[in-house]
Amino acid sequence: MRVNGEPQELLVLPHRTLLEVLREDLGLTGTKHGCELGECGACTVLIDGKPQLSCLTLPAQVIGREVTTIEGVADGGALHALQESFGALNAAQCGYCTPGMIVTAAALLDREPDPSLDQIRHALGGNMCRCTGYLKILEAVQLAAAQRVTAP
Ligand code: FES
Ligand code: FES
């Protein structure tokens, strides 16, 4: 597979999850280990640009595919607009949900650059946050969208 643009050739036991392989074998600990049951969204990564739960994905399912984690959403040295807006609006408190929120929202903005509030709510519907009450997160996605739409 490719991870954040880099080819990775790994030999792993087939029952391990993509979440475990990313965190333990590749050291990409930005992807968070939450419920392991497909319910919290903390482990979300992009597979071929689409949000997927890495705790429910086996390595064999990503052979030859492109995986993007929170470590890969920045553009070189420049933060992604969502990373900027989450910071600017204090949309992260403990931060445990934040990587999953940002990669999920990044996929939304790639397919829908100017989403409605309902579209943002729907896209993030599988990502739980125990801290923020969600309002700041929704505002941060709106801010990132607005900044990208108006960017030169
Ligand atoms: S850790 Fe994967 S959905 Fe919770
Ligand atoms: S900021 Fe703590 S879980 Fe969302």
Image (tube, grey):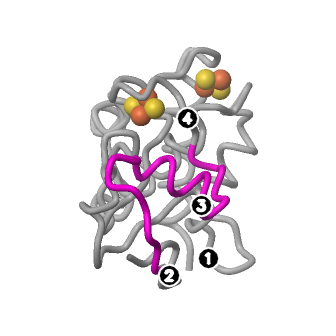
Horizontal placement of 86 versus 21: left or right? right
Q: Rounded to the nearest whole Å, what is the CA distance between mark 1 and mark 4? A: 25 Å
Residue 57, compared with residue 125, is above or below; it is below
Q: Which residue is mark 3?
A: 25
**In the rendering, which numbered label is found on residue 33?**
4
Closest to the observer, 151 or 103: 103
Q: Rounded to the nearest whole Å, what is the CA distance between mark 4 and mark 3? A: 14 Å
Residue segment shown in magenta: 9-31
Q: Rounded to the nearest whole Å, what is the CA distance between mark 2 and mark 1? A: 11 Å
**In the rendering, which numbered label is found on residue 108?**
none
User: For the residue carrying disc 4, how many other residues have a C-alpha within 10 Å: few (<14), some (14-19), or many (20+)?
Assistant: some
Residue at 62 percent of width and 19 percent of height: 132
Is tag 2's residue or tag 4's residue first in the polypeptide sequence?
Answer: 2
Residue 105, compared with residue 67, is above or below; it is above
Q: Which residue is mark 1?
A: 75
Is tag 2's residue or tag 1's residue first in the polypeptide sequence?
Answer: 2
Is tag 1's residue or tag 4's residue first in the polypeptide sequence?
Answer: 4
Residue type pointed to by label 3: Asp
| Image depth: mark 3 or mark 1 in front | 3
Horizontal placement of 59 versus 2: left or right? left
Q: Residue 98 location in percent, x, y?
A: 60, 38
> Badges 3 and 1: C-beta atoms under 8 Å apart?
no
Horizontal placement of 10 versus 72: left or right? left
The reply to whether the residue tagged 4 has its Cβ within 8 angstroms of ligand 1 is yes
